[in-house]
Image: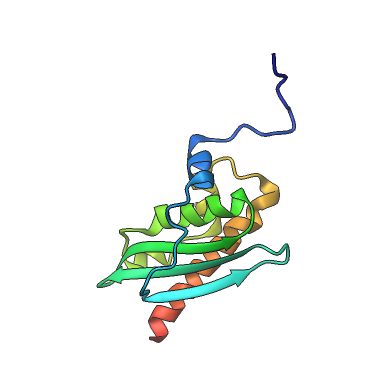
């Protein structure tokens, strides 16, 4: 019988699905917006946004980081795909953490990193 490790928190299904999802980790041939953001811990997220009019059609990304970073980048995509640019601007790192429900507090910087990369990519759309 295997002992339960009390040091590992119990993760929500949302967190686990987002942490292990890899289908968005691609570089699209064309993107309407792109930005990269890195953190002091060495993690980085580069986001690519594709629009249909003023609606976010897809979010793709490259990451250098842990499962928490991947979960947060996927959560950003889940929360903004299909929304207008104007509605997607309201996204916060707290929204990302709430969506995941069990993001460890010591990894909140991963939510800030993913949301920050997304907002920088949006800013690039506005400058274009």
Q: How is the image coloured?
A: rainbow
Q: Residue furthest top?
A: 1
- Foreground residue among 108 and 58: 58
* Left or right placement of residue 54 versus residue 48 in this view: left
Quadrant for the N terminus, please. Answer: top right
Q: As displayed, is residue 110 above or below residue 37? A: above
Q: Residue furthest left?
A: 53
User: Residue 32 is drawn in which quadrant?
Assistant: bottom left
Residue at image position (69%, 34%) is 8
Residue at image position (40%, 62%) is 59
Quadrant for the C terminus, please. Answer: bottom left
- Foreground residue among 63 and 38: 63
Q: As displayed, is residue 39 above or below residue 10? A: below
User: Residue 64 is drawn in which quadrant?
Assistant: bottom right
Task: Give how far across and how far down residue 44 sits, in percent.
Answer: 61, 65
Residue at image position (44%, 67%) is 27
Task: Give how far across and how far down residue 57 sits, in percent.
Answer: 31, 63
User: Residue 69 is drawn in which quadrant?
Assistant: bottom right
- Foreground residue among 101 and 18: 18
Q: As displayed, is residue 124 above or below residue 115? A: below
Task: Give how far across and how far down residue 39 sits, in percent.
Answer: 67, 66
Residue at image position (34%, 69%) is 50
Total number of numbered labels? 0
Q: Residue furthest bottom?
A: 128
Task: Give how far across and how far down residue 16 sits, in percent.
Answer: 53, 39
């Amino acid at each position: 019988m295997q002992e339960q490790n009390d040091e590992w928190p119990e993760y929500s299904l949302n967190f686990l699905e987002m942490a292990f999802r890899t289908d968005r980790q691609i570089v699209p041939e064309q993107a309407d917006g792109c930005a990269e953001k890195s953190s002091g811990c060495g993690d980085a997220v580069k986001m690519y946004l594709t629009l249909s009019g003023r609606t976010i059609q897809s979010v793709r990304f490259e990451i250098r980081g842990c499962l928490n970073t991947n979960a947060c980048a996927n959560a950003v995509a889940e929360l903004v795909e299909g929304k207008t640019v104007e509605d997607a601007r309201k996204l916060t790192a707290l929204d990302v953490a709430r969506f995941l429900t069990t993001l460890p507090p010591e990894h909140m910087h991963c939510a800030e990193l993913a949301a920050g990369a997304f907002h920088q990519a949006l800013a690039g759309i506005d400058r274009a």
